[in-house]
Image (cartoon, grey):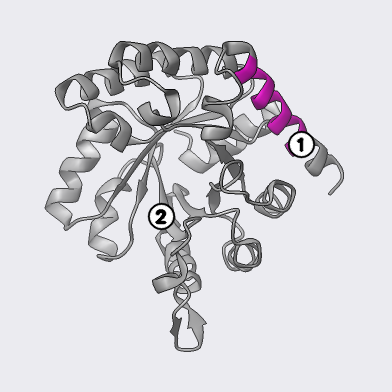
């Protein structure tokens, strides 16, 4: 049995790719409110990037908004991605133990995802139900990429910002080598500090592309010790004229920048 983080390390080394394609299928960005058109576009994005990406990250909100049809679309998307890539459920769950167990069964059992994003706010019993299987991983929100992330995450606790406390706490949960952290590319100094505190944890790094995060710094620091996955959503899924050629060209450009940064580190 190979742990989640071990599998992720192996895949990134084998493919020389740290690219995670975020599937944030926003009808407003796509310019169509047709579910069938959005489905087709989702599969086009996957087809155009399958040999470039190491992971895909469907954002549950963009599927759930469609109700039962959206859940069916999410099932189809997970199956379409297949087992050769890391499937990240961007669900940001966080609830008491018994409820968390139901979420874990849904995400890992029913939908077949490899890992999930989680909020740490309710403490350890909201995380533990997702950690039973070493092959299934979690990415805990630590220092996020959104504009108001610092409202709580930068607050000092015993002299250290809260995000560092979360990183230290997450280290202690990593008994099965299946813990990771979400750290935004829009916070380069914080990313550096977190990588120093948590050298062995995988990092999921959003905020590159539309949010303007520092790609070179993120891929270098993120992969100094553990793995740093670079997530790009809108910058790939809605690139150019949104054709498969435009999507692929954008993905190739991001991946080439990552490879160049790693080689020059």
Instruction: Measure the C-alpha gap from mark 1 to mark 2.
Output: 26 Å
Report which quarter residue 78 is drawn in: top left
Is 51 drawn above or below residue 141 in the view shown? above
In the depicted view, which residue is nearer to us: 49 or 147? 147
Question: Which of label 1 and label 2 is nearer to you?
Answer: 1
- SS type, badge 2: strand
Lateral position of residue 29 relative to residue 74, left or right: right
Residue 140: which numbered mark, if any? 2
Which residue appears at 27% of the width and 34% of the height? 107
Q: Dot 1: within a 10 Å radius of its alpha carbon, few (fewer than 14), some, or many (20 or more) residues? A: some
In the depicted view, which residue is nearer to us: 264 or 173? 264
Residue denoted by label 1? 257
Residue 169 percent coordinates (x, y): 42, 68
Residue 167 part of the magenta segment: no
Toward the left, the furthest residue is 98
Quadrant, the N terminus: top left
Residue 248 part of the magenta segment: yes
Span colored in magenta: 246-258
């Amino acid at each position: 049995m190979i742990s989640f983080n071990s599998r992720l390390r192996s895949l990134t080394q084998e493919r020389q790719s740290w690219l995670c394609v975020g599937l944030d299928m926003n009808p407003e960005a796509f310019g169509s409110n047709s579910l069938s058109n959005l489905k087709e576009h989702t599969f086009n994005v996957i087809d155009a990037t399958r040999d470039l990406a190491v992971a895909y990250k469907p954002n549950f909100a963009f599927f759930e908004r469609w109700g039962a049809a959206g859940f069916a679309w999410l099932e189809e998307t997970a199956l379409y991605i297949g087992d050769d890539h890391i499937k990240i459920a961007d669900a940001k769950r966080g609830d008491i133990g018994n409820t968390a167990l139901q979420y874990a069964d849904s995400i890992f059992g029913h939908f077949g995802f490899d890992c999930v994003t989680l909020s740490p706010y309710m403490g350890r019993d909201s995380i533990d139900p997702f950690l039973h299987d070493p092959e299934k991983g979690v990415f805990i929100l630590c220092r996020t990429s959104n504009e108001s992330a610092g409202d709580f995450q930068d607050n000092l606790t015993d002299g250290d910002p809260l995000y560092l406390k979360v990183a230290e706490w997450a280290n202690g949960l990593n008994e099965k080598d299946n813990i990771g952290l979400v750290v935004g590319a829009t916070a380069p100094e914080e990313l550096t500090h977190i990588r120093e505190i948590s050298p062995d944890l995988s990092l999921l790094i959003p905020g590159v592309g539309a949010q303007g995060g520092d790609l070179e710094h993120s891929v270098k620091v993120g992969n100094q010790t553990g793995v740093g996955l670079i997530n790009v959503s809108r910058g790939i899924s809605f690139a150019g004229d949104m054709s498969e050629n435009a999507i692929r060209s954008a993905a190739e450009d991001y991946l080439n920048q990552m490879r160049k940064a790693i080689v020059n580190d």
